[in-house]
Image: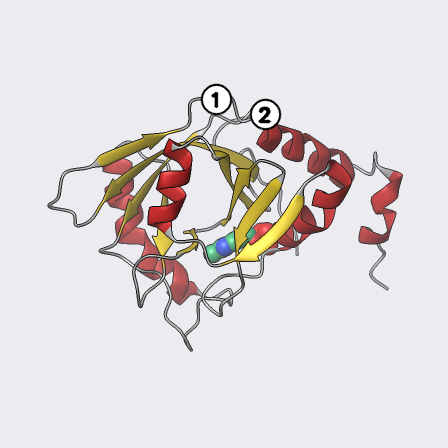
Amino acid sequence: MSSIAGGYFGEGVPKPARVMVSREFVRAFPDGLGEVKTAANYAISIYPQKLASQKECDQVLFLDAIHREYIDELGGMNFFAIRGNELLTPELNGCILHGITRRSIIEMAPKMGLKPIEARIAFSDFCKEIESGKITEAFACGTAAIVCPISEFIYQEKLSSEATRIRFQNEPKISLKILHKLSEIQRGHDAAYNSWIFSIP
Ligand SMILES: Cc1ncc(COP(=O)(O)O)c(C=O)c1O
């Protein structure tokens, strides 16, 4: 079965997303269902997503359930950050969906001069590295959105606490390059990735 999906955040060049992060909500637990596509994972993310919309955020970035510190993924997309020529993404830990877009970007990265690194990413370190200018971009990815740059994180320890805003200062140039490259491959315009396209007998 297939269906046509429109642009996730509007058509054309994606509008960079604002993302809510709260240690109060988690979407997946170790030994649970986080890495599979099941309705339970989406049910648990509906309420935080509603709160995010009220704060004029487009999406929620979920942290791990135990420490409430390590970045897992967004409600319906995987997560990446750019640090110099490093392309960072949370390692597959049982709580993260093994997205095909995530895997495609990791495979494409070396040909784009980027070194993919799958690791635990502490949210506090991540914020410090944005502030110090080491991490310059972050984006969400998935089949529907392909690549959506993130402009800003609105972070709250608890819903009742004051919100902290962390913004990127620069244009998401590398994220948009990845979006362009992946879109070209999906349209069959890049012969180097022909092995990704095959007929189903
Ligand atoms: C929770 C979650 N993470 C990540 C993704 C992205 O996966 P894919 O790239 O396979 O579309 C999705 C897509 O639906 C998702 O629901």
Residue 146: image x %, image y %?
Answer: 59, 40
Q: What element carries label 2?
A: helix
User: Of 161 and 14, which appears nearest the observer?
Assistant: 161
Q: Is mark 1 on a helix, strand or loop?
A: loop
Q: In this view, does 6 lie to the left or right of 125?
A: right
Residue 35: image x %, image y %?
Answer: 50, 67
Q: Distance between the residues labelled 2 and 1?
A: 8 Å
Dividing the picture into quadrants, the one containing residue 66 is bottom left
Residue 164 shows in this picture: yes
Which quadrant, please, contains the N terminus? bottom right
User: Of 195 and 69, which appears nearest the observer?
Assistant: 69
Residue 118: image x %, image y %?
Answer: 57, 56
Amino acid type at mark 2: Lys
Q: Residue furthest front?
A: 132
How crowded pointer 2 is (Cα within 10 Å; few <14, some 14-19, many 20+) is rated as few
Which quadrant, please, contains the C terminus? bottom right
Name the disc covering residue 170, or none: 1
Residue 59 shows in this picture: no
Residue depicted at x 41% and y 39%: 129
Amino acid type at mark 1: Asn
Q: In this view, does 134 lie to the left or right of 175?
A: left
Name the disc covering residue 173, or none: 2
Residue 155: image x %, image y %?
Answer: 26, 41
Q: Do the residues labelled 2 and 1 touch (CB within 8 Å)?
A: yes
User: Of 3 and 18, which appears nearest the observer?
Assistant: 18
Dividing the picture into quadrants, the one containing residue 126 is top left
Residue depicted at x 40% and y 32%: 132
Q: Is residue 107 left or right of residue 165?
A: right
Color encoding of the figure = secondary structure
User: Of 133 and 182, which appears nearest the observer?
Assistant: 133
Residue depicted at x 54% and y 64%: 92
